[in-house]
Each structure stands twice: as C-alpha cells, then as structure tokens.
Image: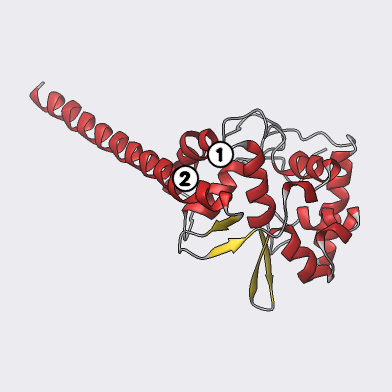
Amino acid sequence: MKTFRLLIAAAGIVSLSIISYYVIVVVMARDYTRDVIIKDLESKSWRRPNGSVNGFLLSAGDMTQRQLDILLAVEDPTFFEHNGMDLRTPGAGITTLTQGLVKILYFENFKPGIRKVKQTLIAVFALDPLISKEDQLLLSINALYLGHEDEKEIRGFEEAAQSYYGKSFESLTEDEYVSLVAMIIAPNSFHVLRHPEENAERVRRIKKLVAGEYKPSGLMDVYYEKH
C-alpha cells in the first residue's frame, strides 16, 4: 500500500510539472505575441524567431475573395470558426493556418512530436485569442513557406509569383495561383518547377474540391485521392 501511495504521489508530481511547463509555454507565447508579433503587424512586417524581419509584400486587399475562398477550402475550411485547432472537418488535416503560423513565428527549428503539443497550445491560447483572423490571413499570405529557388527560401505569394512565374501576384492567372496553393502542403513534393507533373495533378484535384465535385472522406484526406 505504501509503495502504491508513493507511485500515486510521484505521478501527481510529474503531472503537475508537465502542466506547469505548458502553462509557462503559453504565458511566454502570449507575452511574445503582444510584445513582438502585434508590434510587427503595426509596422506591416513579420519576423522569424531568429530576429530577421520581413516587410509585407501583400496587403489584405491584394487578394480577391475567390483567391481567399480557394486558399481556405484547401488549407483551413473552418478558419473563421475554429479557435486555432480543428480536428473534425474532413480534408482539414491536423494543422490549421493558425497552427502553421505558430510554426513560422514561434519556432526556429520545428520538429514533429512534443513540439506539436506546444504548437497547438500556442495556437489556441496565444495566437488565436490575440491576433484577429484578418491579421492571421495577412501574416499567412506573406509568410507561408513555398519552397526554395536558387538556394533562396521563398516566403509568401508575392515572392512565389515573382520567383516561379516572373510576374506580380496580381498578374497571376487562377491556374497559376492554384499551383502555388498546391505547394503549401508539401512545397518540395509539389514544387511547381521541379515537380510540375505532381503539381499539375494536385491542381486538378483542388479544382474538383473547389467546384464541389470532390468531398473529402475524413480529416486526413488532404490529397483528395479517396473515392
């Protein structure tokens, strides 16, 4: 009986330590959001955790409603309804746009595993409560990772349009825009220049999704290949 009580006590201490750790993670993330991310937004910029600051190349008004609808249909169907996390919507996958921003803005080197827990907690209790959905979208269209070109990391739709198509974002055709959206889930596998066939196939599937001709069959049906 004494051994059992000791085990219970030890388990309680461990649990309390874990909870305390994650509380500290959230508190620090909220402070960082207020002190850094919100101030960067006010100056129309965003930064990586290493301190490198990047000015916005696109404003919210540069994206049409049609372009926004396509982006959300593919990447985050319940973006305006969820609290930073969505594990129920078919085709949504396990990473919302909000969680994706957490990966970009709060982690220098993000790796799956325990950091996924931190990513989710920061999304739900720090980023989403403190940053409006509109500003989250503004950050997303400027900071999303869209592969490499000439050994340079491509961030955001404007930079991707110029790097891959040699034109401004506003000059893209819908097919060209969708080809960039197609890269988000796996920029290297669906790279528009290095893997054009794979990119074109994903574009075809995205078009079917947007047209209502394909309905994802489960949370992880993010490649639209189940029939």
Mark 2 is surrounded, within 10 Å at the Cα level, by few (under 14), some (14 to 19) or many (20 or more) other residues, namely many
**Residue sitting at x 56%, y 43%:** 99
Amino acid at circle 2: Thr
The three-letter amino acid code for the residue at tag 1 is Ile
Q: In this view, does 91 lie to the left or right of 166?
A: left
Say which quarter of the image contains residue 211: top right
Residue at the spot x=74%, y=58% of the render?
157
Q: Is residue 177 above or below residue 191?
A: above
Q: Residues within 10 Å of mark 1 (few under 14, many from 20)?
A: some
Outermost left residue: 2
Residue drawn at 52 percent across, 33 percent down: 129
In this image, 33 relative to 88: left or right? left
In the picture, measured across the screen, residue 49 lies left or right of residue 211, that is: left
Task: Decide which of tag 2 and tag 1 comes sooner along the chain.
Answer: 2
Q: Mark 2 points at which residue?
A: 33
Q: Which of the pair 112/75 is nearer the observer?
A: 75
Q: Which residue lies furthest to the top in this view?
A: 1
Does any portion of residue 15 appear in the rendered image? yes
Q: Do the residues labelled 2 and 1 touch (CB within 8 Å)?
A: yes
Task: Determine whether 183 is above or below 1 in the image.
Answer: below
Q: Which residue in the structure is indicated by mark 1?
A: 131
The quadrant of the rendering that contains the C terminus is top right
What is the secondary structure assignment of the residue under circle 1? loop
Residue 194 x %, y %: 77, 71
Side of 46 where 119 appears, left or right: left
